[in-house]
Amino acid sequence: MKGVPEFSELAQFLVAPGAPYPLGATCDGEGVNFALYSEHATKVEVCLFDAAGKESRICLREQTAFVWHGYLRGLQPGQRYGFRVHGPYDPARGLRFNPQMVLLDPYARAVDGLEDFSRGGFAYVPGSPEADLEPVGCEQRAAPLGMVIDPCFDWGDDRWPNTPWNETVLYEAHVKGLTMLHPDVPPKLRGTYAGLAHPAMLRYLKKLGVTAVELMPVHAHVDDPFLVDKGLRNYWGYSTLGYFAPDLRYSASFRRGDAAGAVREFKEMVKALHSAGLEVILDVVYNHTAEGNHLGPTLSLKGIDNPTYYRLVPEQPRYYFDYTGTGNTLNVRHPQALQLVMDSLRYWLTSMHVDGFRFDLASTLARGLHEVDQLSGFFTIIHQDPVLSRAKLIAEPWDVGEGGYQVGNFPVKWTEWNGIYRDSIRAFWRGEGGRASDLGLRLTGSSDLYQGDGRKPSASINLVTAHDGFTLRDLVTYDRKHNEANGEGNRDGDDHNRSWNCGAEGPSTDGQVSALRVRQQRNLLATLLLSQGTPMLVAGDECGRTQRGNNNAYCQDNEISWMDWQGRDESLLAFTRKLLRIRRGHPALRRQKFFSGRPIRGGDIRDVMWFRHDGETMTDEDWNNPHTQSLAMFLAGNGLEETDSSGRPLCDDNLLLVMSAWSQDMEFTLPELPGCAGWELVLDTSRDVAEEACRPGEATLLVAHSLKLFRSPLAGPPAS
């Protein structure tokens, strides 16, 4: 390997004091500076490994503000390394140092391989009567080694697309699952960063009409031993080991034996997506790590400085606070742990050129002693940081701890996965009565959640499905989860899905059931893409992907989770593309301001109006009626109160969205409104060809469980 000396040469390197920052391994062309933070360690050794795997240990003798550092002249990119950190092994005090462990640098920009638990990995003796209290006395090498990289990369004219939030359409996808079965991606590139950057994928995403790819975790992660023992994998990747290194599992370069090439390949993917006008959002997991609870492995942070990086129970620091359901919680109350997160975020923005982040279990990052705190250091640093404050920031606004459900409570500059939107839309379309009032709020941007704190409708990340839960097709095919393949007795996964199988559990040959399922998928997609806010589409929902009823496919690295390109529903795909064209073409569907409800230019029309099936305005009684299952939303084309990039007032057609979750066909009278001479049908979820023209006051037939969108060209100049 280039730059990796033989073992006999390692002792010849000159060790200089070096610098305490930047942390990690930094190459300047003449040597490498190593810097590692450990407040409680008594000694730190950097371990260099030659091409044959032989180790040479060099003590970092300089210490500045708890950072151990040294400069090794002569080392070059490609050098593999780890750390041995000395100190007390005293779990009762929260200290878990054991120099038998070769630890991964938490700032490693690349890793040389995957974890290997056959080589140990536990700082204690597994199976000991004293559990984790007895330190292991033999070498443990489960953690992958870090690798020194050359940071240079020709970004050329790469530019961040900077798509405005109100024009953003997110596409949540898994790097591997998206292309593993794609017939037009070369087999050697399938399931990789290079596969996602392939022209076939870029064409597909552009034609679909999304603007940003939200990638499930790409940080280096661990396949948990309990899954590997069952022949499964941590497919979703929410078990982070390294916050700076791209995961090798998704690297075509690694498959060719070039571990360092994974960094370059990731950058090339981002550059290709940017060239197609697509943003890259990373799903990041800064709330916990792969090291688990007190019985978990020691791979990096736990052996470097356990009390600094993890939240320990004050009265019993042997144990960990667990707000994540994974065994541990990162201690972002500590300045150094917080710096780790911020340094990682800046690195992915500035060095890897990504556009933003979706924060897994984000409430955990905002916790003070126990409660979620909007004024936590985490938010404060992000808001004042000149780099981070410009990124797209998306919160999953909940965790598993008490008070963790925080939808609507994140600060300005943040958007949020709107779980209330998801539940409301699902409930309405499966026929639950009494949802009209809540539905009205969700369709118009959830002003009850986001308007009061200075945010815009785009702060609501609208979703009806996500990676966690049923796919769209399964949402209308199953009443119950079917997670037997996970090997947990179908006990895992959510039991409250608000799904509806349309009359039969699982696949059905009944024509009426099949037709209803098609309409329901279209209803949910149309509602999602015609609502105010930022829509998130899950990869495969646009073409009928199924997980066979599995609503927790986190461990299914196989056809259950992968995109089925050969079996895709072309009709549903065409319908989704049409919806996205409609959204792009109508600024009234992606407003930058909340509706005011005021009359426009002193007339009788308001910017948003609501009607019932007889064409009359919805009353308070209608909104609160538990039997109301249909309504129409009118959007005034001259009621945007917004301007385009040139400062000209924006206007649009008048739009009318008519929805019915009734189980029977119904007549819906189109309202008579000033300036609306006629209504032209734009979209009908009950049929592919939408051709219909109605005069105001005439009735249109709404098929049971269906939706229609009408337009009426704007008459007269836009409102000033």
Image (cartoon, rainbow, N blue to C red):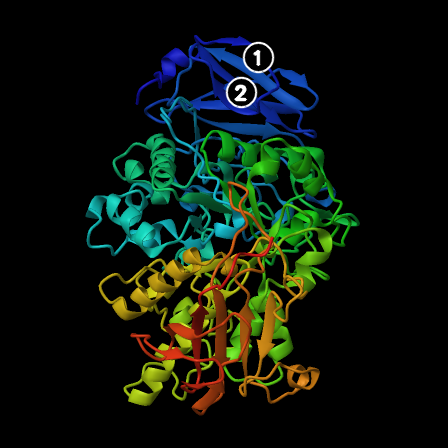
**Residue at 73% over, 57% down:** 452
Under mark 2, the amino acid is Phe
**Residue at 54% over, 88% down:** 614
Q: Secondary structure at mark 1?
A: loop
Q: Quadrant of residue 48?
A: top left
Under mark 1, the amino acid is Gly
Q: 600 and 425: which one is in front? A: 600
Outermost residue on the right side: it is 315
Q: Secondary structure at mark 2?
A: strand
Mark closest to the chain's N terminus, 2 or 1: 1
Q: CA distance from mark 2 to mark 1?
A: 8 Å
Tag shown at residue 34: 2
The crowd level at tag 2 (other Cα within 10 Å; few <14, some 14-19, many 20+) is many
Total numbered labels placed on residues in the image = 2
Q: 119 and 73: which one is in front? A: 73
Q: Is residue 688 above or below residue 92?
A: below
**Residue at 70% over, 30% down:** 40
Quadrant where the N terminus is found in the figure: top left
Q: Position of residue 488 (x, y in %)?
A: 47, 70
The crowd level at tag 1 (other Cα within 10 Å; few <14, some 14-19, many 20+) is some
* 231 on left or right of 534: left
Q: Is residue 24 visible?
A: yes
Q: 227 and 195: which one is in front? A: 195
Q: 403 and 24: which one is in front? A: 403
Q: Position of residue 512 (x, y in %)?
A: 33, 89
Q: Which residue is mark 1?
A: 18
Q: Is residue 89 visible?
A: no
Q: Position of residue 243 (x, y in %)?
A: 52, 38
Q: Is residue 530 above or below residue 208?
A: below
Q: Position of residue 541 (x, y in %)?
A: 38, 65
* 451 on left or right of 283: right
Tag shown at residue 388: none
